[in-house]
Amino acid sequence: MNGLFTGATILDSPTTASDILLRTFASGGVDTCFANPGTSELDLVKSLGRSEIRSILCLFEGVVAGAADGYGRVRNAPALTLTHLGPGFAGAIQNLHNAKRASTPVINLIGQNPVDHSDRYDVGLNSDIASLAKPVSHQFVTIDDARAVSEFALEALKAAASEGGQVITLAVPSDVQAAPLAAETPIAASPAVPGRAAVDFGAVEQAARLIRDGGSVVLLLGGSGVEADAQIAAARIAAAFPNVRLLLETFSARLPRGVDLPPIGKLPYFSEAALAALAGASHVILAGAKEPVAYFNTPGLPDELAPAGSIRVLASPAADVEDALAKLVQQLGADGAELPQRAHGIAEMPGRDTPLLADLIGPILAASLVEGSIVTTESPSAGPGFAKAQINAPRHLALGLTGGAIGLGLPLALGAAVGAPGTPVYALQSDGSAVYTISALWTMAREQLPITIILVANRRYEILNVELLLRGLTEIPERIRSLTDLGSPAMNWVALANGFGVEARSVSNCGELMDALAGRENARAPLLIEANI
């Protein structure tokens, strides 16, 4: 992880274990903490007030976790989260699940009652914190020695930076937080941070041999294999060998896109389409991607989507996939393969008076982007249209939903805006998932973050309707439709946004959306655009 220090530092004044803990994190490059604290964290709160680490209050722990995820994805370095005992941490679980699936570096601090107090008294907030934390953490540790808090912090930094990024959770009992430490207490020297796993050259040679043999090959890119240089390397291979087809994993944590990058399609989400995309492949070579399987068991369709016996591994998700692809290019002699140039701009823009439809939102957003923009996408309705159009937009970074737990989009945009100050951030957001973490708007307003939210208001969980139809329903009965309908009553997103301090406007045709997006690259505060479709 960038910024980890290597020299020991001696504090020049008496302090507490919380001070040492946070100053160690700060010396290791951590500069932000997203927090929703409670009583068991008060000594950590006091230390944050004395720390150089920026504290950002969120009104719900799901926003805390999602914001830390967004920050970590754009910075490739961890933010801290601060939550209250087990019930508080439990509110963060859905978005920590997404962060873990995204391999985002995050360090969670959970305040805890003194262990002997919890053991002796069954007070209301007692819970099994470890059982809550372990499923959404790569490592869980209770800091049980105030004198060793610096070592605990440095090990957490090292672990968070390993294997491309990990979620690390530390429980800190309140008596440990408050423990006084002498002025000469040292901040421990940083251990070496492990890099990604080295490339297996045997796997590179095998992939080169399979490609040269001339059979149909699908090169499936995932993890760091979707970074810009990796995409270009893969495209050189496909340009030199017509038997190679390229696909990106379905959901990428961070995906550079734009007209200067190869227009590589994604493996479709729905099983039937994914099977068709992989059909006929003699070899499916995984470059940072996991083996493609069905997201849900669909009756009549196989769970394993690649042809039987076709899977080969070039590099695992934890490996240096960019280096593996660069070596494969060299092995194949594809260094000089020319990539086709494409025209800039979105070719098929709708007319201004055209009523707003879900598949028209994406091209309008793509045409509004400037170089370096960040876009978070959590909209099954408008997302496909944006995915098609964004390949012709200026270079930008797309952050997606990795773990399937909805309610990530708004917090993800919040964290990305904090992690990349001054960068235009856009959130393409469906209404159903936005409700989960709507309080993120308050923090956006408080911090005056330049986030533009396109709130796709179809007033239903449309993805569930699609899935029901795919399960054989020719028509969705009213009693079932009531479980997917968000229109009775309809939510007033302009009023909701205003209530949280965010400016908002409602649009119903393409021209109104274009006007609302005009000039947002220079925004200095958040804006929510209710896109009625």
Image: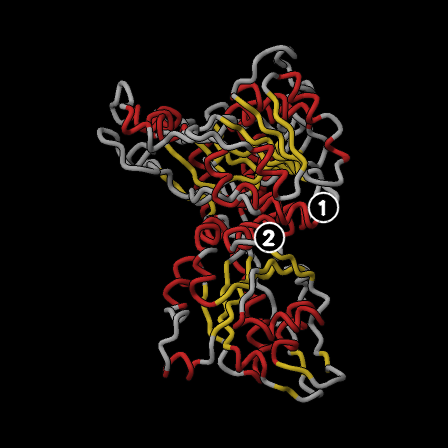
The answer to whether one can see residue 205 in this image is no
Q: Nearer the viewer, mark 1 or mark 2?
A: 1
Measuring from the top left, give residue 125's x and y in whole percent.
41, 69
- Circle 1 sits in a helix, a strand or a loop, which is it? loop
| Residue drawn where x is 59% and y is 61% of the image | 80
Q: Quadrant of residue 286?
A: top left
Mark 1–mark 2 Cα distance, whole angstroms, equals 20 Å
Relative depth, front residue between 302 and 48: 48
Other-residue count near label 1 (Cα within 10 Å), few / some / many at <14 / 14–19 / ≥20: some
Label drawn at residue 448: 1
| Residue drawn where x is 57% and y is 13% of the image | 355
Q: Is residue 408 left or right of residue 154?
A: left
Looking at the figure, which quarter contains the N terminus? bottom right
* 271 to 164, vertically: above or below: above
Q: Dot 2 corresponds to which residue? A: 72
Relative depth, front residue between 134 and 249: 134
